[in-house]
Amino acid sequence: MAEKVKFNRLFVMKLMYHSACLLAFAVLISSCYRPDEITVEVSIPQLAGQADADVIERALTEKNGTNMEMVKTVSFDFDKRLVRVTYNAKLTALKNIQHAIAGAGFQADHIPPLPGSASKRLPPAQGLQNPGKSVNAPAPPNTGK
């Protein structure tokens, strides 16, 4: 009978040990969990209007950069000069988002526009230098007085 009690006590101790190990493993794994979708705000100092937003959105959703499978939503706050991007964290990272924006010709957080990327931005509207005169207007006649 003493051997049976000793065996049961040993069995219970092993069961408690394995349960504790399993619980510790579960806690460790759950702390490493990263959600699939993350929403970030990226500061874009040059963000001026809808034309810039269209260029940035196209850069984030085109097939040769990041693509719509990675980027879920893109929204803009023109007053704060921010873009909010929701993306799949298992497929891309914040650095990829920032570099796609920099590749479109805009500073993204601390990443400057990439060289040669300014051509993707629309040029600013060019106003007339002398609004009262047309470039192609004929010269006034010389009356010789």
Image (cartoon, rainbow, N blue to C red):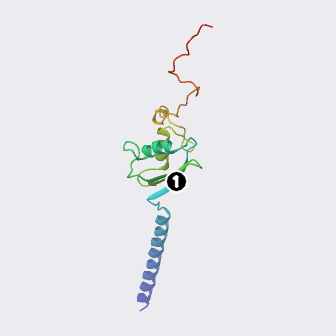
Front residue of this view, candidates 9 and 60:
60
Find residue 48 and report its horizontal and vertical position in percent: 55, 42
Residue 143: percent from left, percent from top:
58, 10
Q: Which residue corresponds to the image point at 54% horizontal and 40% vertical from the top-left?
A: 107
**Residue visible at 40% across and 43% down in the picture:** 65
Quadrant housing residue 141: top right
The quadrant of the picture occupied by the C terminus is top right
Percent x, y of residue 7 = 42, 84
* Residue kind at label 1, given as amino acid type: Val
80 relative to 58 in the view: left or right: right
In the picture, measured across the screen, residue 80 lies left or right of residue 38, that is right
- Tally of numbered discs: 1
Q: Residue furthest right?
A: 145
The residue furthest top is 144
Q: Helix or strand or loop: what does disc 1 sit on? A: strand
Q: Could you say where residue 54 lies in the image, as x and y percent from the top left?
A: 46, 44
Residue at 48% across / 57% down in the picture? 38
Above or below residue 47? Residue 34 is below
Disc 1 marks which residue?
A: 40
Q: Residue at x 45, y 75 (%)?
A: 19
The image shows residue 15, relative to residue 138, as above or below, that is: below
Q: How many other residues sit within 10 Å of disc 1, few (<14), some (14-19) or many (≥20)? A: some
Say above or below: 97 vs 121. below
Q: Which quadrant is the N terminus positioned in?
A: bottom left
For this rendering, which residue is in front, 96 or 108?
Answer: 108
